[in-house]
Amino acid sequence: MAPPVVYGGWIVLAASFFCAMLVIGGTIYVYQLFVLPATAELGISRGSASNAFIALLLGIAIWSPVAGRLFDRMSARLLMPLGGIAYAAGMITVASTGSPVAMLLAVFVFLGLANALAGGLAANTLAARWFARRRGRALGIASIASSAGGFAMIPVLTALITRFGWRQALLVAGACIGATIVTLALLFIRDRPDVRLMTAAGEIDVTSAPVGEAEWTFSKLTRSRQFWLIALSVGLLLASDQAILTSQFPYFLDIGLETAQAAAIVTAMTGSAILGKLLVGFLAERLDVRWLYGMVALFHAALLAVLLVQPGFLFMLVFVSIFGAAVGGIYPVWSVLVSQHFGAASFGIAFGAMALFTQVLAITFVAFANRLFDATGTYTDAYLAFIGAVVLGMVVMAMVRRISHAPQENISWED
């Protein structure tokens, strides 16, 4: 059977990539842009403003295991458009109401659901299904969606907020991004490839591929030592990532940088993260993923150290252009670890269940950083604590069992 001109997996990956890019960039990454204008209008502290981000993370945490199970059982072509609709509903509701409680509920219910159905979970699940031989690079590409979202959405939302105000910016983003996600999902998302198609594309070798993969359940996952080791080590870096993302823009303004300079640093960091994730995904097909975790963790610690030093604009810009891969670089490592230990057939439930735990850590770190700021007027103590968390993550990762076989091979859950 002759392979098609373009393997369908690349089309599915591209569509899910852009959906995740829009929903993650349009929520997690742009939150920091709304902190100062929203606190000024509503008359609340930054600690109180962080409740919105915590509500988002809590929504993602609660919806992710449900969405993961749904992706393993139902059509992604149905689920992802629902994520686009949820995104539009959430952003429009936040923009239209003056009630902080209504805002928090909209963020928790609608934007949390949007991230679970059309964000990284969807993109990574589809990448794990459609790719085997090139799964590392496919998951690396899928993980870029978050950084690409920040790279694309931060300048756009900054311009919209500056010209029209934060509420109007939310309305425009909600309508445009929601409609785009629905359109992309309906036109290009396909659930599962045929074995013959994957064989023709060189993704699997039917003479050596396993008959099937063990099916993981939520109960089996919670009894797996490897599940908890991966969840803790990955969760510590992800939590530090989220806390940095919510604080870096106002932090740069606090240390005396201008708005344009702060936006340039954040954009440079996300651009660097894109290249870093591609490299990590490519190397994951060749190297022990635990060593890649160590590399990302060291970069992350170096980034936190530089933030503590508070250098000038030019030095900061150059540094984050090189070490920006630390922010979000853990995502391809996480995806590959999940696919290696739990297989493509159960990727959705494993990734979603793990997200429940990692988001709880992220909520804790974000609340910790903002409460410390309210008490001390600086993020210094929080950043110091995050360096300790990174070191702990490296210790835990050293206890994760090494997987030496091809990603499509079967793995028993009794480990």
Image (spheres, rainbow, N blue to C red):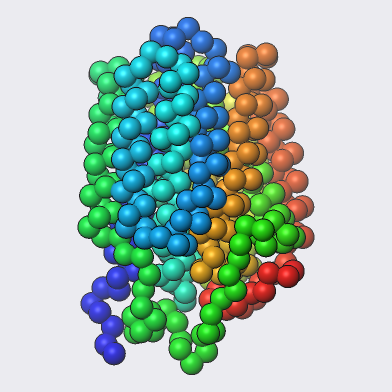
Residue at the farthest top position = 43
Work out whether residue 268 can be spotted.
no
- What is the x, y in percent for residue 42? 44, 9
Q: Quadrant of the C terminus?
A: bottom right
Name which residue lies at 42% across and 35% down: 111
Q: What is the quadrant of residue 202 in the picture?
A: bottom left
Drawn side of residue 280 relative to residue 271, left or right: right
The residue located at (47%, 51%) in the rendering is 67
Residue pictured at 55% horizontal, 42% vertical: 61
Residue 57 in percent (x, y) is at: 53, 36
| Residue 269 visible to the viewer | yes
In the depicted structure, whether residue 132 falls above or below residue 211 = above
**264 or 40, which is in the foreground?**
40
Determine the residue located farthest toward the bottom in the rendered image: 207
Q: How many marks?
A: 0
Asked whether 302 or 83 is in front, the reply is 83
State the quadrant of the N terminus: bottom left
Relative to 99, is 287 above or below?
A: below
For this view, does 368 lie left or right of residue 213? right
Q: Quadrant of residue 210?
A: bottom right
Residue 367 is situated, as x and y percent measured from the top left of the image, at 62, 26
Taking the spot 37% from the left edge, 58% from the top edge, the residue there is 76
Foreground residue among 155 and 170: 170
Return the residue nearer the eye: 345 or 363: 345
Q: Quadrant of residue 405?
A: bottom right
Can you give x and y, in whole percent of width and height, for residue 241 in the image?
Answer: 57, 39
